[in-house]
């Protein structure tokens, strides 16, 4: 466990500028607690489905293909992570984020924000509707693309995870620096599994189950 | 601690970078002032109010933009909230210990000086006062470190601080400024992500029984 050295993504200048060069220090067994926040389960939201395909009732549907994304969050033993905060965000169908810091020339869709929060249910499950995000060129100077992806942040219990769900078949998957660092695990763990949705409000569904370490939670069984 | 069958564990989802566009509005419900649970409340947590501030640098000593910082600490009684102490009368009800922000390289947290942690779980060591800091940024997935405080006698025997090699230990200790901010002592804790003066970071991946 000790001496883990973080790797730097190929063709990723920010990674080069910000990744520590020294090995990560091992934490003594007597002091493992306190490295991840432990947060109470959130009250059930009761607001129904998070639907990012419309910014408000009565507004036009966002441009692009509407998709459903669903899954279950559990720890390594399969126990559900109940009522955790899930934050999701992604680019629009053109590959542009509705974020003040995204200054690219990709088209901004006035009917898409693409950022939302939801709470996992008592079985750790979640579901939301959004638009299939576009891929985009992240570094035009070196020709580096980001394939289609949706960002996820999971905050609850003693877990703290930020990850991304990817889509099979994107031509830029194989050259993505993060995907390269993940190696063989990427396809099984990080790619949404396609399924047919029950109604016609979305074109297709993607199942993305998430397994969190629970960090120091293992010490409190 | 119960021994578990570690062979059948499910593989963990990979950590991935937060990227440069973490939504700013997600932080609307979060605070960088832990001395009030909500601005509308009169309750104040126990303990000495302090300010912890600092900068986050990249390898070129430029301020790192778009960085998400999360802070997690014990209350003045040295109680860090966890599943083992829910409902404990020793927990300060006016203090929750979790703060977060997205900054362009400069942060400022108003809080209280955490207490010394007494061992609450079997096998745990006593701890010097510390604030845990988690860092998310474009370019890496997640980093964790802990800020200690100048002048605390228990620093000399804190197992986490002492896990850092002696030449770099001082990088984990916040220094007290001579000036105060609205009468509150100010501590400075700069974070260097990479290169000269690099901050020590910790590996908090779970230890499996068969590796421990």
Image (spheres, coloured by chain):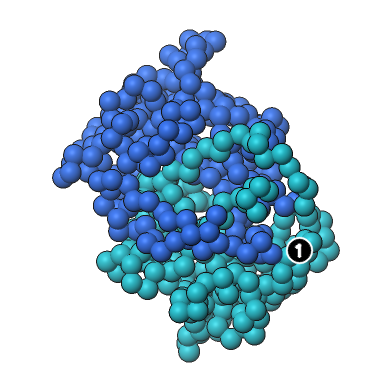
Chain colours: A blue, B cyan
Q: Is residue B26 visible?
A: yes
Q: Residue at x 53, y 59 (%)?
A: A2
Q: Residue at x 71, y 32 (%)?
A: A122
Left of B124 or right of it: where is A106? left
Residue B13 locus on image (x, y percent): 52, 37
Left of B61 or right of it: where is A194? right
Q: Nearer the viewer, residue B54 or B17?
A: B17
Residue A128 locus on image (x, y percent): 52, 27
Left of A189 or right of it: where is A64? left
Q: Is residue B102 above or below residue A147?
A: below
In this figure, which residue is indicated by the disc labeled 1? B123
Task: Kindly identify which chain the residue marked by label 1 belongs to.
Answer: B
Residue B161 locus on image (x, y percent): 57, 73
Which quadrant of the figure has residue A36?
Answer: bottom right
**Residue at the bottom extreme of this rendering:** B178
Q: Residue at x 79, y 57 (%)?
A: B85
Q: Nearer the viewer, residue A29 or A212?
A: A29
The tally of labels here is 1
Which quadrant of the figure has residue A112?
Answer: top left
**Element class at badge 1:** loop
Q: Is residue A218 above or below residue B39?
A: above
Q: Residue at x 45, y 15 (%)?
A: A204
Tell me if mark 1 has few (under 14), some (14-19) or many (20+) residues whose alpha carbon lies within 10 angstroms of its own: few
Residue A79 locus on image (x, y percent): 70, 35
């Amino acid at each position: 466990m000790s001496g883990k050295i973080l790797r730097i993504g190929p063709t990723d200048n920010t990674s080069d500028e910000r990744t520590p060069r020294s090995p990560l220090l091992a934490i003594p067994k007597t002091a493992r607690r306190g490295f991840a926040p432990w947060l109470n389960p959130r009250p059930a939201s009761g607001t129904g489905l998070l639907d990012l395909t419309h910014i408000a009732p009565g507004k036009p549907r966002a441009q692009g293909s509407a998709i459903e994304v669903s899954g279950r969050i559990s720890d390594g033993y399969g126990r559900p992570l109940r009522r955790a905060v899930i934050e999701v965000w992604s680019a629009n169908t053109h590959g542009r984020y509705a974020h003040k810091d995204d200054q690219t020339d990709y088209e901004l869709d006035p009917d898409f924000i693409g950022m939302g929060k939801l709470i996992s249910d008592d079985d750790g499950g979640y579901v939301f509707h959004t638009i299939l995000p576009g891929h985009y060129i992240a570094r035009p100077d070196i020709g580096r693309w980001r394939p289609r992806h949706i960002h996820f942040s999971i905050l609850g219990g003693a877990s703290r995870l930020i990850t991304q769900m990817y889509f099979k078949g994107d031509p830029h998957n194989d050259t993505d620096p993060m995907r390269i660092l993940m190696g063989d695990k990427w396809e099984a763990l990080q790619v949404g599994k396609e399924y047919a949705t029950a109604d016609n409000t979305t074109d297709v569904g993607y199942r993305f189950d998430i397994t969190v370490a629970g960090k120091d939670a293992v010490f409190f069984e | 601690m119960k021994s578990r069958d570690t062979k059948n564990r499910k593989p963990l989802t990979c950590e991935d970078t937060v990227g440069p566009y973490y939504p700013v509005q997600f932080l609307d419900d979060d605070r960088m002032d832990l001395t009030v649970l909500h601005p509308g409340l009169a309750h104040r947590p126990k303990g000495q109010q302090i300010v912890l501030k600092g900068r986050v640098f990249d390898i070129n000593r430029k301020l790192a933009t778009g960085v998400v910082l999360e802070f997690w600490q014990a209350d003045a009684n040295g109680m860090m909230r966890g599943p083992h102490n829910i409902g404990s009368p020793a927990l300060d009800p006016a203090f929750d210990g979790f703060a977060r922000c997205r900054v362009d390289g400069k942060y400022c947290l108003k809080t209280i000086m955490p207490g010394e942690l007494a061992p609450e779980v079997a096998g745990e060591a006593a701890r010097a006062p510390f604030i845990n800091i988690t860092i998310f940024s474009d370019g890496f997935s997640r980093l964790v470190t802990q800020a200690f405080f100048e002048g605390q006698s228990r620093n000399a025997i804190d197992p986490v601080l002492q896990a850092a090699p002696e030449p770099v230990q001082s990088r984990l200790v916040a220094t007290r400024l001579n000036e105060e901010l609205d009468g509150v002592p100010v501590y400075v804790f700069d974070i260097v992500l990479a290169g000269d003066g690099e901050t020590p970071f910790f590996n908090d991946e779970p230890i499996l029984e068969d590796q421990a």
